[in-house]
Image (cartoon, rainbow, N blue to C red):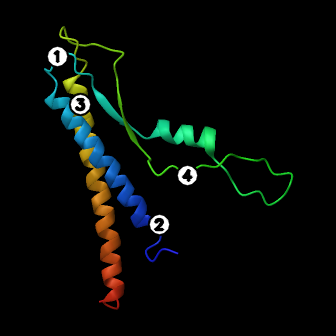
Amino acid sequence: MSFFGNTINSLEQSLDYASLKNQTISNNISNADTPNYKAKNVVFKNVLDNEIENTFQAKRTHAKHIPFQSSINQQSHRVISNSSTTYNHNGNNVDIDKEMTELAKNQIYYQGLVDRLNGKFTSLQSVIKGGR
């Protein structure tokens, strides 16, 4: 049993994802002029889809229930490289406008997570102080 519930753990994993995404986007931007550099992206949905499709299991409480497969994967996201496109004459496929847009979206997402985490800690602080 977790003392804080699963919310803080979920927020922590989401912050890890947003941090890795920010680092990946920053690497793409910094390598925008590097010959033959291929843009990278952090994916979550593909990993989730694969886990659900291939390895999801529910507890069977009756013999007529549909069986599922089970596997718990701690990694919820991964970095992939897109080598199927080329935008520049030097073999580079970084679209700087797309990367800057993704960076702005990710910063807003990250700030929202931080605000939510601060709200959780503020609530805990209020409880510890007895509602004062």
Tell me the kind of residue under disc 1.
Pro
The kind of secondary structure element at disc 3 is: helix
Q: CA distance from mark 3 to mark 2?
A: 32 Å
- The residue carrying mark 2 is 6
Which residue is at the front of the view, 76 or 101? 76
The kind of secondary structure element at disc 4 is: loop
Label located before the other in sequence (3 or 1): 1
Q: CA distance from mark 2 to mark 4?
A: 16 Å
Q: Residue at x 43, y 41 (%)?
A: 44
Residue lying at the far right of the rendered structure: 64
Neighbourhood count class around disc 3 (C-alpha, 10 Å): few under 14, some 14–19, many 20 upward: many
Tell me the kind of residue under disc 2.
Asn
Compared to 100, does 84 lie above or below?
above
Residue lying at the far top of the rendered structure: 89
Is 102 placed left or right of 67 in the picture? Answer: left
Q: Residue at x 47, y 52 (%)?
A: 74
- The residue carrying mark 4 is 72
- The label number, if any, that marks residue 35 in the structure image: 1
On the image, the x and y values in percent for residue 30 come to 14, 31
Residues tagged 2 and 1 counted as in contact (Cβ below 8 A):
no
Tell me the kind of residue under disc 3.
Glu
Q: CA distance from mark 2 to mark 1?
A: 44 Å
The kind of secondary structure element at disc 1 is: loop
In this rendering, which labeled residue sits more in front, label 4 or label 3? 4
- The label number, if any, that marks residue 99 in the structure image: 3
The kind of secondary structure element at disc 2 is: loop
Compared to 10, does 49 lie above or below?
above
Q: CA distance from mark 3 to mark 1?
A: 17 Å
